[in-house]
Image (spheres, rainbow, N blue to C red):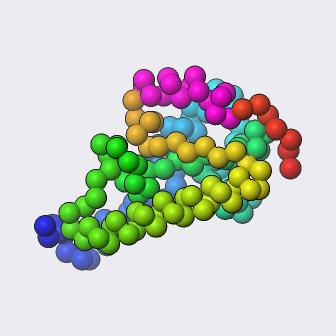
């Protein structure tokens, strides 16, 4: 299936996709803040740690990545489907993103960080948010030593 946009229009559309401050990130940040968790978003650790985590919670020695279901290839998710046009290129792109995510997670764990990945689809419904509220203390664990 051919793309419905010209190459110039497709480039314009793709350039408007946000890389930070996305709706799922903002929803998670709001939820964490309401629950009393404190974190950095654009602090030095966010910029220097492998993978540039979306949120760093130094008190818990934890980092959180908010992954978009499409861009990170969330398996068995209704929000992830390979495009019909240029599907081989997209498959390689998303597999590359997944491989990079695994490398970054491994590097962070080697540095002593607890890594949490939250998928975009889990931040859409109130029932999923309620589940997340219950699980956060278990996901983050007890406060750790500050470095």
Report if residue 52 is visible in the image. no
Q: Is residue 64 left or right of residue 24?
A: right
Q: Residue furthest bottom?
A: 8
Q: Image quarter for residue 133?
A: top right
Q: Please say if 85 is above or below 147.
A: below
Tell which of 7 and 109 is nearer to you. 109
Residue 11 image point, x, y percent: 31, 72
Q: Is residue 146 left or right of residue 92?
A: right
Residue 124 image point, x, y percent: 40, 35
Residue 136 included in the magenta stretch of the image: yes
Q: Is residue 22 left or right of residue 39?
A: left
Q: Residue at x 39, y 29 (%)?
A: 125
Q: Residue at x 42, y 25 (%)?
A: 126
Identify the main secondary structure in magenta. helix
Give the quadrant of the N terminus: bottom left
Q: Residue at x 71, y 37 (%)?
A: 38
Q: Please say if 57 is above or below 141.
A: below
Tell which of 71 and 124 is nearer to you. 71
Q: Please say if 126 is above or below 28.
A: above
Which range is magenta?
Answer: 126-140
Residue 15 image point, x, y percent: 38, 67
Number of numbered discs overlaid on the protein picture: 0
Q: Image quarter for residue 14?
A: bottom left
Q: Image quarter for residue 70?
A: bottom left
Residue 137 included in the magenta stretch of the image: yes
Tell which of 23 and 93 is nearer to you. 93
Q: Residue at x 48, y 59 (%)?
A: 98
Residue 136 image point, x, y percent: 62, 30
Q: Residue furthest left?
A: 1
Report if residue 57 is visible in the image. yes
């Amino acid at each position: 299936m051919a793309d419905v946009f010209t190459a110039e229009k497709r480039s314009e559309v793709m350039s408007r996709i946000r890389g930070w401050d996305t709706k799922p990130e903002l929803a998670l940040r709001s939820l964490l803040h309401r629950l009393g968790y404190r974190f950095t978003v654009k602090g030095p650790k966010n910029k220097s740690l492998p993978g540039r985590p979306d949120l760093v919670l130094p008190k818990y020695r934890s980092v959180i990545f908010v992954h978009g279901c499409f861009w990170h290839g969330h398996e068995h998710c209704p929000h992830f489907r390979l495009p019909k046009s240029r599907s081989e290129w997209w498959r390689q792109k998303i597999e590359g993103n997944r491989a990079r995510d695994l490398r970054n997670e491994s590097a962070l764990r080697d540095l002593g960080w607890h890594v949490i990945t939250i998928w975009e689809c889990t931040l859409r419904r109130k029932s999923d948010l309620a589940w997340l509220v219950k699980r956060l203390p278990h996901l983050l664990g007890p406060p750790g030593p500050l470095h």
